[in-house]
Image (cartoon, rainbow, N blue to C red):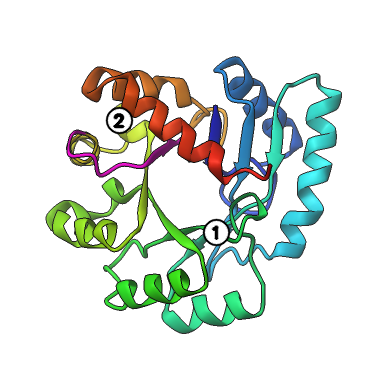
Amino acid sequence: MVDIHCHILPGIDDGAENILETIEMAKLASADGTRHIIATPHFNHTFLNSVEVVHKLVPQVQHAIDLAGVDITIHPGNEVRLESKDFVVSHTLNKQYCYLAGNPKFLLLEQSWHNYYAQTLEIIQWFQERGTRIIIPHPERHSFFRNEPQLLVKLIEAGVWTQVSVDSLLGKNSDAAQRLAEWLIQHNYVHMLATDAHNIRRKPNLSLGFDIVDHLVGSARVQEMKDRAWSILPL
């Protein structure tokens, strides 16, 4: 399995505190059947983790994981927050963040936690003209998508992919988040799962999510989600 959203790099955001926790997270992921993790530290006003920071840490983390005998490959990425149009466009043009696994065809673009950004569709179209598909992480956790699911449906119809978090399906991110996550899956509005793991408590648990998807809509949809995640990785 491929986990496209994981805060496994140590000491740079609200994810793993140190390399020891990073290794423990990798062990949990490997035991769960994950073989590739895209490290996605935050890129926002609070944690401006640049491409230089990510590219420096990823090989260091890979070396530590290899020494620990863990069968996991780490890839660079970022979870970019849509702080504003200017924030995203300027940092894109200046190449300040990482696309998923270094693949410019895919970007993890997070909404603000306060309000839906009114120019979202315009920004998505701007990225599409550049050949980049936007993946929206954990939409089920945002109150504006729960209150008005059609906001998200319009983005999906415009070509966006969505990523639901396993913990939401497990009921760990509120009952409301669980209900929307299940509704999105049942209506074929979810393109992939990820863990959004941050530590050994908010841990890598991808297989549990796929078990729930299998129960809700069947194994064919599970395979579709897994295939999309694999398609992000470099050949």
Q: Is the Cβ of the residue at disc 1 closer than 8 Å to that at disc 2?
A: no
Task: Tell me if residue 193 is in the magenta stretch.
Answer: yes
Q: Amino acid at mark 2?
A: Leu
Q: Secondary structure at mark 1?
A: loop
Q: Secondary structure at mark 2?
A: helix
Number of callouts: 2
Residue 230 lies, with reference to residue 204, above or below; the image says below
Residue 114 lies, with reference to residue 88, above or below; the image says above
The location of residue 61, given as percent across then percent down, is: 78, 39
Dot 1, how many residues are within 10 Å of its Cα: few (below 14), some (14-19), or many (20+)?
some
Q: Is residue 134 left or right of residue 212?
A: right
Dot 2, how many residues are within 10 Å of its Cα: few (below 14), some (14-19), or many (20+)?
many
What range of the chain is rendered magenta?
186-194
> Which residue position holds label 1?
105
Front-lying residue, 193 or 48: 193
N-terminal of the two: label 1 or label 2? 1
Residue 70 lies, with reference to residue 85, above or below; the image says above
Tell me the quadrant of the picture where the N terminus can be found.
top right
The location of residue 15, given as percent across then percent down, is: 58, 44
Q: Amino acid at mark 1?
A: Lys
Front-lying residue, 50 or 94: 94
The residue positioned 55% from the left and 59% from the top of the image is 105
Q: Which numbered disc covers residue 169?
A: 2
Task: Tell me if residue 53 is in the magenta stretch.
Answer: no
The location of residue 150, given as percent across then percent down, is: 14, 58
The residue positioned 53% from the left and 71% from the top of the image is 45
| Residue 211 seen | yes
| Residue 195 seen | no
The location of residue 178, given as percent across then percent down, is: 23, 35
Tell me the quadrant of the picture where the C terminus can be found.
top right
User: How far is the residue under mark 1 from the one under mark 2?
Assistant: 27 Å
